[in-house]
């Protein structure tokens, strides 16, 4: 038995349902197994793990790195979030399109977001712990973002007045982002 992997409306963004073994003690699952993920099409090397703890209504994002792009494998350990990926790759057929998915510590699902996408999430429970693996290291000075409430994107966030960092509140809309600060879509890379 292995995990289930489902494509989404954004090419390369995958929903992953790991196999969970439940008994009277609780549960067990593999949160990552390189061989199984490679067999499922995720052939990236992960070099950094992050853990984010947030309170209800917090919104983190929409973030990306340009010169050191990060693919992310996201999972909620406790609580619940609404996770969003936005295709910001210039030339992509789905440029400016977004995908939102509910993730929770009870379901154990994961989402894989490849390089070239902006990523963000908001907290739906009292608190949430989110862990995510990255394909490149966090690089100070290579941080970019898109405003969470960009009217052109019209993301259906399930929060109205989120708790934001000053940096997240000041990011430009996608249409205002300097074109040199957006990744380029490469149709030969899948």
Image (tube, rainbow, N blue to C red):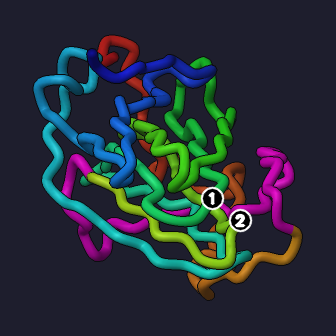
Q: Are marks 1 and 2 in contact (CB under 8 Å)?
A: yes
The Cα atoms of the two marked residues, 1 and 2, are separated by 5 Å
Left or right: residue 158 compared with residue 48 = right
Residue 65 drawn above or below residue 24:
below
Question: Which residues, given as a range, are shown in magenta?
Answer: 134-159
Left or right: residue 126 compared with residue 137 = right
Which residue is under mark 2?
124
Decide which of 190, 38 is in the foreground and name it.
38
Which residue is under mark 1?
81
Residue 107 drawn above or below residue 95:
below
Image x and y of residue 42, in percent: 26, 26
Quadrant of residue 40 in the image?
Answer: top left
**Residue 126 marker:** none
Residue 188 drawn above or below residue 19:
above
Image x and y of residue 84, in percent: 61, 48
N-terminal of the pair, mark 1 or mark 2, is: 1
Q: Residue at (71%, 59%) from the top-left corner?
A: 173
């Amino acid at each position: 038995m292995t995990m289930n992997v489902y494509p989404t409306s954004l090419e390369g963004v995958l929903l992953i349902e790991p196999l969970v073994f439940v008994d009277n003690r609780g549960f067990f699952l593999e949160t990552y197994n390189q061989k199984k993920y490679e067999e499922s099409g995720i052939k990236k090397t992960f070099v950094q793990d992050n853990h984010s703890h947030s309170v209800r209504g917090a919104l983190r994002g929409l973030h990306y790195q340009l010169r050191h792009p990060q693919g992310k494998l996201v999972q909620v350990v406790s609580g619940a979030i609404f996770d969003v990926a936005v295709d910001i790759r210039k030339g992509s057929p789905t440029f400016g399109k977004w995908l939102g998915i509910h993730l929770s510590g009870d379901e154990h699902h994961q989402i894989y977001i490849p390089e070239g996408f902006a990523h963000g999430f908001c907290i739906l429970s009292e608190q949430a712990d989110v862990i995510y693996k990255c394909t490149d290291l966090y690089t100070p000075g290579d941080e970019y973002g898109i405003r969470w409430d960009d009217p052109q994107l019209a993301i259906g966030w399930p929060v109205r007045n989120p708790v934001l960092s000053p940096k997240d509140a000041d990011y430009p809309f996608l249409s205002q982002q300097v074109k040199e600060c957006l990744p380029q879509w490469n149709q030969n890379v899948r």
